[in-house]
Image (cartoon, rainbow, N blue to C red):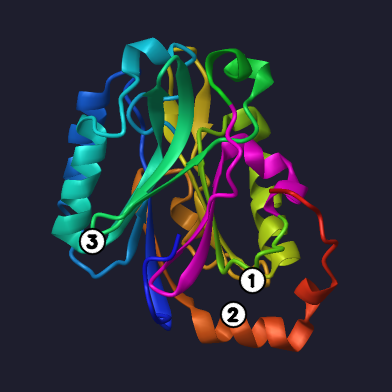
Amino acid sequence: MCIRDRVKSKLHISALQIPLFWEAPTENRAYIDKHLQKIDSLTDFILLPEMFTSGFTMNPKVVAESMEGPSIKWMQSWASRLNAAIGGSLVIQEGAYFYNRFVVVTPSNEMIYYDKRHTFKLAGEHKAYRSGTSDGIFEYQGWKICLRICYDLRFPVWSSNIKKYDLLLYAANWPKPRIHAWDILLQARAIENLSYVVGVNRIGQDKKDHDYPGHTAIYDALGHCISEKSTSELETLFTAELDHLELQEHRKRFGFLEDLDNFDLY
């Protein structure tokens, strides 16, 4: 899916770390509105957490929407208003099936989506949602971007950079007991794929009494954290500048991607 002609040398990306209201799409959209209204600097891409309209619910019938539903229309409105792409996962129904779907809407009203490949069996997600099969890779502003959701992070082969993406995005509801793994694996995905990586996680507590500590982070291709660590557990908007030329220089210098195993993933 190609939606641009030339590379934007520097891409500004913002990740919104917030608490979520349980199974309450209207309230969550209104809450996010308050943050988006405060964006006064230019950004190219706004990233929201996993299931940003509901929290990590295994009761999809209560919150499911169509691809023409109110949350998609809301995303379209904000993308146009801010002249930026906006993306995050939400519960989508198609026919008899429910999907944990990462949707991205661009200012030109292009829509890209990726259905979560690895459903989280520990929570019974595999019983409530159908797994996706697409690679989740698209182009925006000249950047090749790969979409992934939460539990996908634990499976490095699924994110192996065979198609030479530039930016890997994870939307998550990652709980506190396993947050150490989140920190390490995000950094590892950046290093092994010579790619920028952004992982956005929620904060707060859900109705199941699961605590979420945030730790939203942005890493460069060498695994250096380029987002502010001191606010990693607070409600905040993380923004960083990604440099495409610098990325290509790292790849040319090290050449690691030329030695990747050619897994047949798609």
Asked if residue 117 is positioned above or below residue 125 in the image, the reply reads below
Mark 2 → mark 3, Cα distance in angstroms: 26 Å
Give residue 184's position: percent from left, percent from top. 70, 50
Give residue 88's position: percent from left, percent from top. 40, 43
The circle drawn on residue 247 is: 2
Question: Mark 2 is on which residue type?
Answer: Leu
Give residue 230's position: percent from left, percent from top. 48, 56
The circle drawn on residue 108 is: 3
Whether residue 82 appears in magenta in the rendering, the answer is no
Residue 3 seen in render: yes
Left or right placement of residue 180 versus residue 111 in this view:
right
Q: Which residues are magenta?
A: 131-159
Tell which tag, 3 or 1, sits nearer the viewer.
3
Pointer 3: residues within 10 angstroms few (<14), some, or many (20+)? few
Q: Earlier in the sequence, mark 3 or mark 1?
A: 3
Q: Earlier in the sequence, mark 2 or mark 3?
A: 3
Quarter in which the N terminus is drawn: bottom left
Question: What residue is at 24 percent from the left and 55 percent from the top?
Answer: 109
Question: Mark 3 is on which residue type?
Answer: Ser
Give the secondary structure at mark 3.
loop
Question: Mark 1 is on which residue type?
Answer: Ala
Q: Is there a contact, CB below 8 Å, between mark 1 and mark 2? A: yes
The circle drawn on residue 221 is: 1
Residue 49 seen in render: no
Question: What residue is at 48 percent from the left and 63 percent from the top?
Answer: 227
Give the secondary structure at mark 1.
loop
Q: Nearer the viewer, residue 144 or 187?
A: 144
Question: What residue is at 59 percent from the left and 29 percent from the top?
Answer: 131
